[in-house]
Image: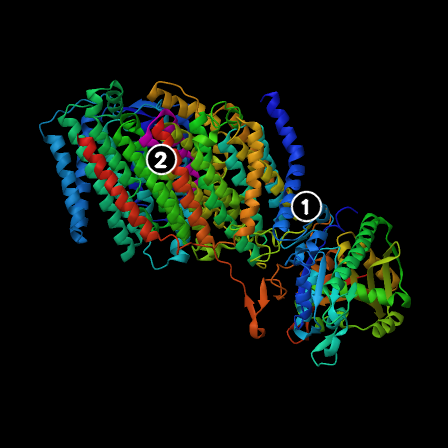
Amino acid sequence: MFGLKQSPWVIHYDASSCNGCDIETLACLTPGFDVERLGVLNTGDPKHADIFLVTGAANEQSHAVIRNIYDQMPEPKVVVAIGACACTGGIFRECYNISGGVDTVIPVDVFVPGCAARPEAIIDGVVQALAALMDRRKAMKALGKNVDQVLYSRAESADAARILSLQKTAHQQEGTIYGEEHVPGLVQTLPALEVELTQRVFIKATVNGRLVGVARGYAQDRTGFISDVIVHPYFHRCGVGRRLLEELEKALPDMNRFEASIGDKCVESAAWLQRQGYELYKTDSWRPAIARVYFQKERK
Amino acid sequence: MSINSWISLVVYLLAAPLVGGLLVGWDRRISARMQSRQGPPIFQPFYDVFKLCKKENIVVRRSQNYYVALFLVFVIFTGGLFFAGSDLLLVIFALTLAAIFLVLGAYKASSPFSFIGAERELIQMMAYEPMVLLTAIGMYMVTKSFQVGDIAGYHGVPLVFLLPGIFLGFLYTLEIKFRKSPFDLSSSHHAHQELVRGLTTEFSGRTLAMIEIAHWYELVFLLGWVYLFFASMPILGVAVSLLVFVLVIFVDNVFARLKWQAAIRSAWAVAAVLGFGNILILSLLR
Amino acid sequence: MMMTLIPLLILVPLVAGLAMLLIRNDHVRRVIVTILVLAIGAASVLLVVAPDAISFTITAVSDHSINLAMNLTEAAMAIFVLYVGVHSRRPLIAVLMAVQAGLMAWFEYGSGSHPEVSQNLLPATDHFSVIMALINGIVGGGICLYALGYMKEYHEVAHTDVTDRRPTFFALLFVFVGAMFGLVFSNNLTWLFFFWEITTLCSYLLIGYTRTEESRRNAQRALMMNLLGGVAFAAAIVYLSRNACPLDLQGLIDSAKSGGSSKALVLLPAALLCFAGITKSAQLPFSSWLLGAMVAPTPVSALLHSSTMVKAGVYLVLRMAPVITETKVGMLVALVGAVTFLVGSLAAITAADAKRVLAWSTVANLGLIVLCGGIGTYAAVWAGVLLIIFHAVAKCLLFLCVGLVEHKIHSRNIDAMSGLIVRMPAVAVMMLIGMAGMFLAPFGMLISKYAVLMAVVDAAPVLSVFIVFGSSATLFFWVKWMGKLVEVVGTPERVRNEFTLGEGLAVGVLSMATFLACLLFPMISSHMIVPYVTGVFGEHAASLTQGNIIIMMIMMAMVMLFPLSFIRYGRGPRVVAAYLSGANVGDKVQFLGSGGKVENTTMNNYYMRGLLSEIWLSRCGVICCTCLLAVMVVIACQ
């Protein structure tokens, strides 16, 4: 894996930090510690970066920003939470505006404790993140090569944690558009998901044991409701979503029609649904300033 | 085209990225040592490019990467034309075309940082273009030919003794072309950014790798042009080219970034005084 | 009188133009204009392919009656202009016209010799005239076709406050086209002058078409400056007649070629004719009339003030090239052109109004052609003719497209054209072709600029500094405009009905022409330009080597690959928002500003108004070039 380990480019964001950890992070770039000899470059641009260094706890305002920056990073990417606040919320955990560490917003791979975390610890954290990065890359490559070997099967309650993680990743862009509190997939908690797994039909798509997509739905009054079809961003446009939808429709037999609804600003999802044979039939207001559009398909 | 030009063309096409990458690696190491740091290994640029090729392709507008692909193609074409010994004016125009594709790609990305980066890049181009054209004209006036092959094979006094003003002006514009302080207005290679990454903000993955490789090709081509000033003494020419490269790095580390108004004023003043002055003297001597 | 294709080309548009005054019905006019345009276009092409196709004799008309008709028309025009000068309280106009009329009267009825001019019109073997006629016929015809749809929208939608005088408008367009044919084929200088004056008058009437205060003022300024050139022209004719010199173009050039005293004698009239050419093609210090003429409707700007009428000025200068080459007069003319090129290119950077940018760019490129004429070597004239061809086609295309855009988005500001590539894709692509044709390798203008550089470096290296600075400036303003067209913020709405049939046909044909001219320029060069230049200079020199042409063709082929990029295949990239420091809101490059307010980003171009002041630049240029012209006249008098 030539290159990925030797050239980690970093983007650094201060969520609500007191700047202590930030100063220590930037100290790593100075001649005293010189991370550039490891190939680390502090780019300020998420589109160029591999490693996302976050300091400070996640407060209300930084949720959107963290998610936005994370979304704009290309795969493979890893997140390093630096300092006590970023790991767990630190001494500010009980505050009204702090939801906790950065892992309440995005999946974190390496936690570097300390208040403030020392440069040596930060460098160690980055090096460990490199290992996680390599793993991520290997998995992506393997998955990328084996698209035709995707397996579709019913999901079980043991899959709940992985489904939740996939949910958070897949709904990033929606969260940016609507605000995360309005996206059910982002606010759902693990217990709630486990309950849902018993009540609804879940079809999962896996490759080499890794979860890449989930579709869920339920039946009611001879109508099949498609709640959600999510696919890992790296697997878009491979036909995974289409197969998941087909499998879900097959798993809800004896239905006259299927219905699905999405937010009105998700233009691409709307287009995708229409390509699967669904037609727009209703627009409704769901929450203030947010409308949902409803699609249906008659079973032939 | 003779056999020699074919050979140098092929050698350029294959070796330029390697040589360019090594030079950039040395650049970072020398800069680091000047800053009392260790610096990355000299193969770091290659690691960077390999890593970038493995990253996902993210865009803001779907067609923005095609401009960069054409940028790379034309930069290689430009260098190829140069090393094949072809017409120097055409080489300059081809390089301009290449740079315009990059700028249009940045415009296409439709983001504020890349927009300003694109405007600044255009200002940089406007700043160095007169001097570069005057260099070509100066070389023509001495060697009576625009063909790089003829200039390289010129057996008289080394051009630099007849074109001292133009040589100095050319060095000044090299600083702009290499995008180094004090002229790294549009996009800076190192961590000191003003506009996030300026021109290259919205490019990622393989596209960014293409821009990097294009810069390597361009680097070798420009140092080759410096060599032309000393073409009749080849070894001295190579030595001076490398020395010029080190000088550019030195200036980069010493100076802070200039404002764009200062950049274009100084570059045009240098072109007018040194470049035009040299040509005036040459035409009077004829 | 022998009626071949050339006299027909002159008379038919003139007569048809006058007849257009009577046609009130729009549909009838549409049909007649279309037929006329097709006929003129076909006849222009026929001129190249089969010049002797039509030939018949009209016995009722003799040379004497033609001259009488011309004199009467000139008198009528003079009276009209005097009236204008008096009525609008611009005594300068009246004075200039009086001087000009006086000079011509002195010529006609004074005691000087009236040399017999054997050939009043140039033959169809004069390739330069044929090239100009082709441009006039095809480009001019296309514009007339475009004007049908454009003026309809102009009066019915965009400018309902302007009185609809379309019969007059189209009449003037066709009269102008006929006059241009006459101008480029005239050998006899008095005939040339006659057609020259008609074009001046057409320009005055068309600029003042909207009858607003502003347009009236600009029309008068144009009239005044062109009259100044006319006075110079008349003075040249008088001088030639009093000194028993030939009164036709061929004769003048032959005198110059025979060298010695006859060359020195014709130098002053040639300088005066160049002066006239400089005023007509809006070189500094006379550029303000062209910039002011942009108030006129777009077809006027395209036809008169970029493609054809102003080309008449540089046509005359290029014709005079063999006379003024290697003289101080020539060098001064070249300097005027060079300074104009530099000032025009720099001034265009500061302009935000699209038509103003195009106007300054026109002035600058005409300066390049005047530069070529001033240097006057084989290579320079070759480059100059090539420049005329490429510039006429590309600039006209740009003007027409800007007209279409203005009607649809109601703005001429470059910053308002953001995202045009999705709002009006066809027009945007054609504009990009036009702009590429104006400065980008390997397209037309670049080939010409390359040739100019080569010519200048051989003849007068010191002038090259103007060219290199000017061409870097042109780079800036064209690319920032191109960038504005391709950038897309959010999802703008697509404009329905970008253009009507006539308009679409005109811009489509022009795009094709820009393209083909670039692709086929070796052929154009060898079949048309080289024969002309060899005929004038006698020798044959290498223009562009074979190797360079091949390289340019390769570059063209590579650029052509670009449209292939729009084919989508495979997974494609992931689309995310632009980077706005993490504060993105929605998908329209909006961000969450301070106070929780959603802000829009605006991205406006650099106009460098702090660095380059348009007023200061033109002032310097005016002073500089006035001095140059004054010196030129003084030197020529000796």
Furthest residue in direction front, as rendered: B36
Does dot 1 land on a helix, a strand or a loop?
helix
For this rendering, which residue is in front, C71 or A208?
Answer: A208
Query: How would you rate the neighbour count of disc 1 (Cα within 10 Å): few for under 14, some for 14-19, many for 20 or more?
Result: many
Q: Residue B43 location in percent, x, y? A: 70, 44
**In the image: residue C600, left or right of residue C459:** right
| Cα separation between marks 1 and 2 | 44 Å
Mark in the foreground, 1 or 2: 1
Residue C14's label in the rendered image is none
Q: Chain of mark 2?
A: C
- Tell me: residue A282, above or below residue C353: below
Residue B45's label in the rendered image is 1
Kindly identify the amino acid type of the residue bearing the numbered disc 2: Leu
Residue C163 in view here: yes
Kindly identify the amino acid type of the residue bearing the numbered disc 1: Pro
Q: Residue at x 82, y 63 (%)?
A: A215
Residue C28 in view here: no
**Main secondary structure type of the part rendered in magenta:** helix
**In the image: residue B224, left or right of residue A86:** left
Q: Residue B227 location in percent, x, y? A: 54, 32
Q: Which residue is mark 2?
A: C463
Q: Is residue A124 magenta?
A: no
User: Magenta span covers which residues?
Assistant: C368-396
